[in-house]
Image: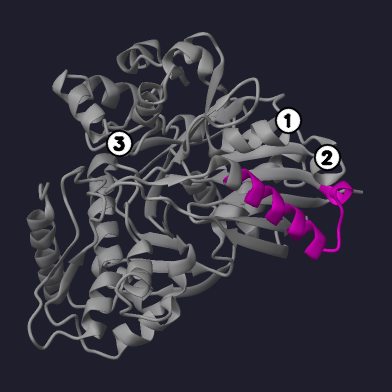
Amino acid sequence: MANYILVMDQGTTGSRGVVYDEKGKTVAIDYEEYEQFFPNSGWWEQSGKTVWEVTLRTSRNAIKKAGLTGKDIAAIGIANQRETTTIWDKATGEPIYNTIVWGCRRTADICAKLIEEGYNDTVNKKTGLVIDPTYSGSKIRWILDEVEGAQERAEKGELLFGTIDCWLLYNLTKGKVHATDYSNAARSMVMNAHELKWDDELLSMLNIPKCMLPEIKPSVGIFGYTDPEWFGAEIPITGIAGDQSAALFGQACFEEGAAKNTYGTSAVPLMYTGDVAPETEKGLLTVAWGKDGKVKYSMGASILIAGQVIQWLRDKINLVDHAAKTSVMAESIPDNGGVFFVPAFTGLGAPHWNTGARGMIIGITAATSKEQITRAALESMAYQTRDLLEEMERNSGIKLKELKVDGGASKNDFLMQFQADILNCRVVRPKDIETTALGACYLAGLGCGIFKSEDEIKELWEADRVFEPQMDEETRENLYAQWCKAVEKSKDWL
């Protein structure tokens, strides 16, 4: 009997294939990175074809490492980088342009024009978002403008759009299914978050033909079946969610006010609000997931640069030789020496929404050390998290009591303790920090019947370590005030 779940955890820098058993325990993992392209300042691309090939390869390898075959897999779950945009030829399945990554800022001018034309309130009321280059809508518009003949071909129904979940699903089914889920569609800037459908007014605003858009489906349920060529069996795909929604589900955040933060290339704090869709002018509302004929809402947004700042210290300026050593470096000194690092490499996302901001290290003196700069880089993730969570508290009226954490940087004990200190609330790290993949496992498991309920999933969740706040209030508020001052200085550089 097939009782294993395969998860395709498709992230920004690479794809992970993970096989889980019927208790949600990891059996095997395979991971592979893919090349990133930065053709101009603020631009960010990937090869859609490579993303598919790597995702397929890591999935096959994970099954092989587990000593299984495709016939042992009961279902597939997909978690993916949100907003990242691919447009492909319906007839050939070939992308007409590189995949444009969520963090790409090339569409700033398109967004500025829409804001100038007075569309921001309309977008905010209908989608819960603000007009920003992060979201898929402006990326679609850019490709249709810049690829010769693309607009005309799209209007004829010859081109298809999809976020990465949709692109993978299309390839897995060999073109039989063109669909996405509510959590991904909600990040497009053209889905009405209240009516749960593509919005004609927003599509008209961007002149996007509706015929190129995928069907929107619940996050739990049968999306389609894999072609037998890929795994030697027709496996149902029964769970799909954007990576951050998947992480929220994987952290068992099923009660109003429950919150998590995923520390990856970016960082994305999310707070579960359930049936309530809070009004927010800062673009923080999104659909968490859809199942059983209903959707659940959450508040949150992307901190554009989180773990990537450590990669920059390592790969670009050789300040550290391994990310794992940053915790020791930070703990080797008593404080940051007055140094603050605002990693606005491609602007600032929520809640600042300043595309003209650029990175800044301030407070440097002749005595500044690499340890202090490294510590300031780590601290920047915690400060940015507070920026967003305070905005969520204001909009929801819910006071944060606890933050569940996951993702690669959550292994950094210094960062987790500093996060607890600067938030003045406990931070809880689970035993399985890859909760994005775990959430996709749970969603797919609900979709195929391996898991029966959210209550069962809550019982499976296990904590590893709790970080309690230790910093006095005066120190905490002084540090945060200096951070806010540094952020203001970084804005509108361009």
In this view of the protein, which residue sits in the foreground, 215 or 51? 51
The answer to whether the residues at label 1 and label 2 have Cβ atoms under 8 Å apart is yes
Give the mark nearer the N terminus: 2 vs 3: 3
Q: Taking 151 as reference, is 456 left or right?
A: right
Residue at the image position 32 percent from the left and 52 percent from the top = 304
Which image quarter: residue 66?
bottom right
Q: In the rendered image, is residue 441 in sight? A: no
In reply to whether residue 66 is colored magenta, the answer given is yes
Amino acid of disc 1: Lys
- Residue 199: x, y in percent? 40, 15
Residue that badge 1 annotates: 174
Measure how far apart labels 1 and 2 are at the Cα level. Answer: 10 Å
Q: Where is residue 466 shown, x and y percent of the image?
A: 44, 73
Q: Is residue 22 left or right of residue 267?
A: right
Q: Main secondary structure of the magenta part?
A: helix
Q: Amino acid at mark 2?
A: Glu
The residue pinned by badge 3 equals 133
Q: Find the distance from the CA under tag 1 to the CA under tag 3.
A: 31 Å
Q: For residue 124, say whether it is visible.
A: yes
- On screen, residue 224 above or below 235: above
Q: Nearer the viewer, mark 2 or mark 3?
A: 2
Label at residue 40: none
Instruction: Tell me the SS state at disc 2.
Output: helix
Is disc 3 surrounded by few (<14), some (14 to 19) or many (20+) residues within 10 Å?
many
- The residues tagged by marks 2 and 3 sit, at their Cα atoms, a distance apart of 37 Å
Residue underneath mark 2: 229
